[in-house]
Amino acid sequence: MNHDQYADSYIRGILEEVRTIAIVGASTNSARPSYFVMKYLSERGYRVFPVNPGQAGKVVAGLTFVARLADVPEPIDMVDVFRAPEHLPAVWEEVAALVPPPKVLWMQLGVRNDEVAAKAESAGLKVVMNRCPKIEYARLSGEIGWTGVNSRTLSSRRPKRLGEGVQRLSIASRKPQGPASGA
């Protein structure tokens, strides 16, 4: 597979299919991108398991850190990696040992390892490299980007019920809404 670019349908399919995400290299520091990603994905309904041996047992943002992937108490659908590319072979060894195997190996922005990607794909996993699931979710849901305004996914109207505003949009396909009133 060409990992230089991904079709929106490929990314959307992954984000709609997975329910449990292990984040390798997650941080307890709220200023770190991995902290924000784990919190964001958790708030969007995913079961998130932060993985960091130095933080194992700590509970941050309602999530309990585990030391390694094998310590996650349920099957993992996606492994999201916040580690430098040179650490990917060791991460892959942990991923490959999981039973059942995850469906997706996702490498964060700046993280690319074509050799590990080839191994994962040959083992039947979908692979995404050099992308952030938080950014992709927000982009595809219309939370960010002008395309959300043009598609009427973003709106200045108040949500009808609490929790239905822009901050809780879904990546699920939407039915087009009628024209805005008063325009």
Image (tube, helix red, strand yellow):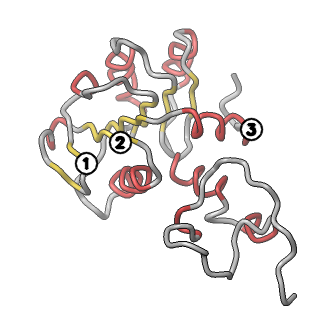
Residue 177 picture quarter: bottom right
Out of 35 and 181, give the one closest to the viewer: 181
Residue 22 shown left or right of residue 149 in the figure: left
- Mark 1–mark 2 contact, CB under 8 Å? yes
Real-space Cα separation, disc 1 to disc 2, in angstroms: 7 Å
The circle drawn on residue 63 is 1
Q: On the image, numbered disc 2 is attached to which residue?
A: 48
First-in-chain label (1 vs 2):
2
Q: Left of 27 or right of it: where is 166?
A: right
Q: Of tags 1 and 3, which is closer to the observer?
A: 1
- Amino acid carrying label 3: it is Ala
Provide the secondary structure element on which disc 1 rests.
Answer: strand
Residue assigned mark 3: 7
Distance from the alpha carbon under mark 2 to that under mark 3: 25 Å
Residue for point 51% across, 52% down:
134
Please identify, in this view, whether the residue under mark 2 or under mark 3 is nearer the observer. 2
Residue 90, quarter of picture = top left
Q: Nearer the viewer, residue 124 or 90?
A: 124
- Looking at the rendering, which quadrant does residue 129 occupy? top right
Front-most of residues 159 and 102: 159
